[in-house]
Image: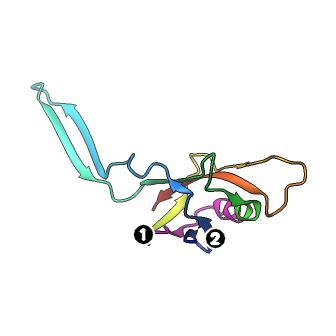
Amino acid sequence: MRHHTLDTVAIPEDVWWSDEFGWTPIAQSSTRSLTGARLVQLGVKLKGRPITLTSNERGGWVTRGTVLSLRALADAPGATYTLTLADGRTFTVAFDADRDFIAAPVRPAADMTDASKYRVTLPLIEV
């Protein structure tokens, strides 16, 4: 089975990039001049693309042990990591502290183990 990797942590390939096409590399700003004409400035964004890796109801589940490893990466202030997707694309990323890291057990129980399955939402940002 192929997988993604974040630093050295393996993530199943069916954890999908949910906002892959929700970002544009173009920044635009517009104002009005004193004559009333519209002034438009365009530029290319160099970094800052959100990369949200998400489980779903039927798959993309990770073990509690993987969640603990990912949480440790998320809790390292200022750390950057190499994200390698299962298709071979690579990105330099950091955890986006403005969005929630979510890990919820698939079947909650009082005796969760490192093998227990979790749905995750990993809020990353390209740096």
Q: Is residue 76 magenta?
A: yes
Task: Identify the amino acid type marked 2.
Answer: Val
Residue 3: horizontal and vertical position, in percent? Answer: 56, 69
Q: Secondary structure at mark 2?
A: strand
Tag shown at residue 40? none
Please give the name of the residue rendered at 42% of the width and 55% of the height, measured from the top-left corner.
Answer: 48
N-terminal of the pair, mark 2 or mark 1, is 2
C-alpha distance separating marks 2 and 1: 16 Å
Please give the name of the residue rendered at 67% of the width and 62% of the height, measured from the top-left corner.
Answer: 70
Please give the name of the residue rendered at 12% of the width and 25% of the height, measured from the top-left corner.
Answer: 36
Task: Identify the amino acid type marked 1.
Answer: Arg
Q: Residues within 10 Å of mark 1 (few under 14, many from 20)?
A: few
Residues drawn in magenta: 69-89
| Among the 4 quarters of the image, the one containing residue 60 | bottom right
- Residue behind mark 1: 89
- Residue behind mark 2: 9
